[in-house]
Image (tube, rainbow, N blue to C red):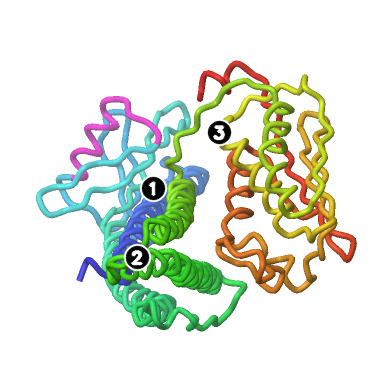
Amino acid sequence: MLHSVRARLTLWYTAILALVLVIFGAVSYVLLAREIRAETDASLADTAHEFAAAFDPAEHTRGRDALLDFRYSDREILVLSPRAEVVMASKSRIGTVERKRIEAFVRAGGRGLHSIPGGEEGDGVRIIATPIDVLGTHYTVVVARALSEQADRLESAAQAVFFAIPVALLVAAAGGYLLARKSLGPVTVMSLKARQIGAETLDERIEIGNERDELGFLAVTLNGLLERLQGSFESQRRFMADASHELRTPIAIIQGEADVALGRRDRSAEDYRESIEVMQRAARKLTRIVQNLFLLARGDAGRYPMSMSRFYLGEIVADCVRGMRSVAQSRGVTITCSTAEDMVIVADEELIHRLVLNLVENAVKFTPEGGKVHVSLASQGGSYAIRVADTGHGIPASEQERIFERFYRGDRILPTNAGGAGLGLPIARWIAEVHGGELRLDHSGAEGSEFVAVLPNGCSEDLVASG
């Protein structure tokens, strides 16, 4: 039962309310007792003052009349001589023990307000002793009031509090539980719905009651999480399907050539060499795909070991362009480069080399015969901008948002451009982002496309040490 959030909320609510009620009851009791005491003291003082003004012990009859004028059902008036002997008294309303203690108090010179403890059964009395001087004789007027009425009133108040607090707690606990149950009901519904959603039903969403309250915000958050999970699952599915397709082709080529080579015994050495060359090209393609997949997998997991060093970025760009000149010439494409050699950068040299090479290779691959590819490097504030422009057919607007997806090639790939797996641009973008930069398609149209890779120069000893 205590494992339920509703039960814990109800217990906490009831405990806090109980503490508040107990404190409130205790404070109210103390204030009530103080108010009753103040009221009693004020009443005694008024009675003593009025009686002292009307008392004349020289006239015995007038003294008795004064006592008759001050008849109260809840108090007694005593007039004591200088020897603390009772000269006259109203109808006795206090016990013998209390009266003797009053006489002892006056005899000891007591004055003012004082509480006299009672006997075994009494609650005691509250008195006020007021000295008066009549014709040179000192008298003491004592007004006494039993504390039993005060005790009864306080006891009634305490009983009312002790009865009201448990009833209030029971009502509050029941109401709190119902309120918690109603408030947390949507959470239970959302939990049951989330439990029903699996890998095959990620398109389902949790119903949102009120987007402006906390539970609505929770539902929106969970739906956002489900949407991201759905996107990740779909991306993984496409990735696995595309990877399987790309891997199946070179494997099929290797398997087919091996079967053909082993199936015929009358083949010449030249035929065997040709088959081996075909298998070698397929194996190279397979190796490159696997290496790219391994690189992306380690990058996604954040476990790629970065090796930071200081080098000249212009030399990397120029080296990549030189390495692609023979390929460009074979395709009838002119490739040029303009860069400065004094641009120092702190980065992973191998990854930056692959980024530039992927961009240049991609541009050469999709530029038709007679076209041009130009690579430039320029400083841009605290960053370097590598621009690779080609005069190819351009990328359709409908495909520009997807060209950085893994294995995506679209209609831009021509049949004569076989060999690409659609991983060059995704890897290049990941390399740029892992260095704190970006890779984007600057523009693309009928006159060609231009990609821009922006890399922070990172020229600090801290980056070198962290590598």
Name the side, left or right, on which 371 lies relative to 27: right
Percent coordinates x, y for residue 254 in the rendering = 38, 63
The image position of residue 26, as x and y in percent, is: 34, 53
Q: Is residue 311 above or below residue 427?
A: above
Q: Is residue 107 above or below residue 182?
A: above
Residue under pointer 2: 267
Residue indicated by mark 1:
60
Q: Where in the figure is residue 101, as x and y percent of width and height?
A: 20, 38
**Residue 102 is a magenta residue:** yes
Q: Amino acid at mark 2?
A: Arg
Residue 350 image label: 3
Label 3: element kind: helix
Asked if residue 116 lies left or right of residue 233, the reply is: left
Residue at mark 2 to residue at mark 3: CA–CA distance: 43 Å
Q: At which x and y percent is residue 44? A: 42, 48
**Residue 22 or 467: which is nearer the viewer?**
467
